[in-house]
């Protein structure tokens, strides 16, 4: 039982630290590398990219539709 | 020529034999056949997860009906056959001898899939690739700390069930940790973890895990309604000042970095990390043909195979093993505590944000992707159709997958020491 409690507390610490590390990694990427923040031009490109993706997906799925 | 009824209809012969020697097995078989039919029915109705429940229920009913006197190994080896040995033409999950396994692969039609895809965790990894392909990591990238906070609270069952399980007589640390992983609500993770920590119990643990995961789909809405008052369920999330939008290239970069960092930290769970982030990378790299292959064929093909195999593994002898009862109790404790933990996390954010955060999002931290996120949105929409919380719920949901993988890896490392 003592060992189980020890493992539980260690796991809580590990998952909290690693979870924070992953979150911090994302935070660093978004703040330092400026991921996610777009200028107007980038925004437009992103929208086009999303549209192209949606069209590509639609083409793939259209193949499955019964004619 | 003499006609022997029991020789032609072998099922009756076995029932008569088992009734004489161990009547409980006969009762167990009948109960499991009925339970299987019920699972198919509830899956068809949408009360339980149909993708899993229909093949599993059918498999469970069939395997308990299709038992016979069968000794394939001696039969193939042409050595004296044990006339009282009970078996099926599906698979044998207990056999561990390599020579015998190769013999069984030639006789039992599901044995090759079980041996080469199920018992080594391949199917868990394939499902993870498919799940990864469904995940939009952008939801996590938009609010990483918030999502991770909820996900960590939603692991309460995974963490607390470990010491609780040790209160059961004869339970080892590996067994306790394996059943505690049910709280993570990630079937592939339970399969992978139990294979590493309690290989002798991985069949019942995985069966229990998937049974409860299917129940979670039907049970969590009641937990939400019971623990979160209607007034709070109706809360609309405030509109964000600046909408976060990452390109697919940026999401791909994040996936690669996260996969490498997590695999470096926890090599024991690296197959799971690679599988998950491979799915995400395929989604974000614009490889549409791969995306279709993984998101449709691999994911659904693996789910069908997994459901069928789990059903086939539910024979009366396995399920009526005395060690299964504590697993059934601990599984529900673990999953229930995780749900409560997620909602506690939601409540903490509700108070921390000045009562602006919808606490129902907490349930999505239980990483049953995307079921719990759907449950959260459905419960909120039921009371307030204009409240959209899906993007927050999916963020917590995806983080839940990552935290469960971290805890699985931590348990494997700490317990195998």
Image (tube, coloured by chain):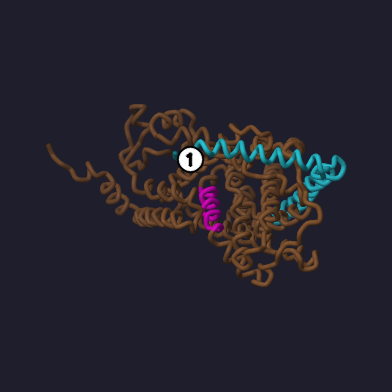
Chain colours: A cyan, B brown
Q: What is the quadrant of residue B366 in the picture?
A: bottom right
| Viewer-proximal residue among B307 and A12 | B307
- Residue range in magenta is B204-217
How crowded is the residue under tag 1: few (<14 C-alpha within 10 Å), some, or many (20+)? few
Q: Is residue B185 left or right of residue B347?
A: left
Is B215 in the magenta? yes
**Quadrant holding the N terminus of chain B:** top left
List the single residue furthest toward the left: B1
- Image-quadrant location for residue B37: bottom left
Give the overall secondary structure of the magenta segment.
helix
Q: Outermost residue, right direction? A: A32
Residue occupying the point 54% across, 49% down: B205
How many labels, in total?
1
Between B173 and B371, the residue placed more toward the observer is B371
Residue at 70%, 67% in the rendered image: B235
From the top left corner, tell me how far across and down residue B325 is, in percent.
Answer: 51, 57
Q: Is A67 positioned to the left or the right of A43 in the image? A: left
Q: Is B321 placed above or below B7 here?
A: below
Q: Is residue A48 visible?
A: yes
State the residue at coordinates (57%, 66%).
Answer: B222
* Left or right of residue B210: residue B414: right
Q: For numbered disc 1, what is the local secondary structure?
A: loop
Q: In the displayed structure, would residue A45 be above or below residue B220?
A: above
Is residue A3 visible in the rendered structure shown here? no
Q: Is residue B148 above or below residue B92?
A: below
* Residue A9 x/y as whole percent: 75, 54
Q: Which residue is mark 1?
A: A65
Residue B175 place in picture, x, y as percent = 60, 49
**Chain letter of the residue beneath label 1 in the structure image:** A
């Amino acid at each position: 039982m003592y060992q189980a409690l020890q493992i539980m507390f260690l796991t809580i610490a590990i998952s909290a630290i690693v979870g924070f590390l992953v979150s911090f990694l994302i935070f660093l990427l978004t703040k330092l590398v400026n991921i996610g923040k777009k200028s107007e031009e980038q925004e437009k490109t992103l929208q086009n990219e999303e549209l192209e993706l949606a069209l590509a997906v639609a083409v793939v799925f259209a193949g499955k539709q019964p004619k | 020529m003499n006609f022997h009824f029991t020789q032609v209809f072998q099922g009756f012969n076995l029932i008569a034999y088992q009734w004489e020697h161990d009547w409980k097995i006969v009762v167990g078989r009948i109960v499991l056949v009925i339970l299987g039919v019920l699972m198919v029915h509830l899956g068809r109705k949408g009360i339980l997860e149909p993708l899993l429940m229909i093949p599993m229920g059918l498999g469970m009913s069939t395997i308990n009906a299709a038992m016979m006197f069968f000794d394939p190994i001696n039969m193939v080896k042409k050595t004296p056959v044990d006339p009282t040995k009970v078996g099926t033409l599906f698979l044998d999950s207990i056999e561990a001898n390599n020579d015998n396994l190769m013999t069984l692969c030639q006789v039992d039609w599901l044995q090759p899939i079980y041996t080469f895809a199920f018992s080594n965790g391949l199917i868990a990894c394939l499902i993870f690739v498919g799940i990864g392909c469904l995940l939009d990591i952008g939801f996590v990238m938009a609010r990483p700390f918030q999502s991770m906070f909820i996900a960590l609270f939603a692991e309460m069952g995974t963490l607390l069930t470990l010491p609780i399980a040790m209160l059961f007589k004869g339970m080892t640390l590996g067994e306790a940790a394996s059943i505690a992983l049910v709280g993570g609500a990630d079937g592939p993770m339970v399969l992978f973890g139990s294979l590493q920590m309690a290989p002798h119990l991985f069949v019942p643990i995985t069966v229990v895990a998937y049974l409860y995961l299917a129940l979670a789909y039907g049970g969590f809405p009641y937990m939400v309604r019971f623990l979160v008052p209607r007034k709070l369920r109706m809360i609309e999330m405030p509109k964000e000042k600046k909408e976060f939008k990452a390109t697919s290239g940026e999401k791909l970069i994040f996936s690669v970095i996260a996969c490498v960092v997590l695999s470096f930290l926890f090599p024991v769970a690296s197959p799971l990390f690679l599988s998950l982030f491979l799915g995400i990378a395929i989604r974000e790299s614009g490889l549409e043909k791969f995306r279709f292959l993984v998101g449709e064929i691999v994911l659904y093909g693996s789910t069908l195979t997994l459901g069928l195999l789990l059903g086939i593994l539910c024979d009366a002898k396995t399920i009526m093993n005395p060690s299964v009862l504590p697993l059934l109790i601990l599984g529900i404790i673990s999953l229930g505590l995780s749900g409560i933990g997620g909602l506690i996390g939601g409540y903490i954010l509700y108070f921390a944000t000045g009562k602006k955060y919808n606490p129902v999002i907490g349930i999505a931290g239980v990483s049953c992707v995307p079921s719990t996120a759907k449950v959260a949105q459905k419960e909120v929409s039921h009371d307030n159709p204009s409240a959209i919380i899906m993007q927050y719920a999916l963020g917590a949901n995806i983080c839940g997958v990552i935290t469960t993988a971290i805890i699985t890896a931590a348990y494997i490392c700490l317990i195998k020491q």
